[in-house]
Amino acid sequence: MANVTFKNIPDDLYEQLKQAANAHHRSVNSELIHCLEKTYKPTRFSAAELAGKAAELRSHVTLSLLDIDEINASKNQGRE
């Protein structure tokens, strides 16, 4: 396993990292590894999981159907 040293981390960024590590009951090193894994390792989802998430998101959207007259009026708006 590789070892990496981070230098010149801005104080405010390091403080945020320490707070996140504390909130997640991890060391700063473990929190940093977690952040890197989240960023660089893709999460695999099955088609069923994606379809379920899409359905859940769609359930929060309210749609009002447009009739043909409203569509045509929108298309022609400003063309006169």
Image (tube, helix red, strand yellow):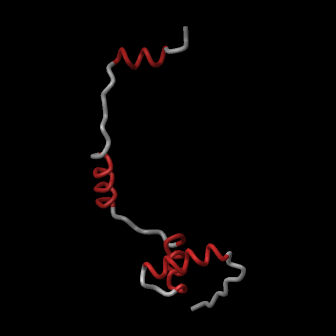
Residue 61 x %, y %: 32, 42
Left or right: 71 as drawn, with respect to 14: left
Q: Position of residue 30 (x, y in %)?
A: 50, 85
Between residues 17 and 45, which one lies in front from this camera angle?
A: 17
Task: Identify the residue at horizontal 42%, vertical 79% (top origin).
Answer: 24
Which percent across, then down, holds residue 20? 49, 76
Quadrant location of the C terminus in the rendered image: top right
8 lies left or right of 30: right
- The residue closer to the viewer here, 65 or 27, is 27
Q: Could you tell me which residue is drawn at 45 percent across and 19 percent down?
A: 74
Task: Give the image location of residue 55, x and y in percent.
Answer: 28, 50
Q: Above or below — where is 72 with respect to 12? A: above
Say whether residue 69 is left or right of residue 29: left
Residue at 40% x, 20% y is: 71
**At 56% from the left edge and 74% from the top edge, which residue is drawn?**
16
The image quarter in which residue 49 lies: bottom left
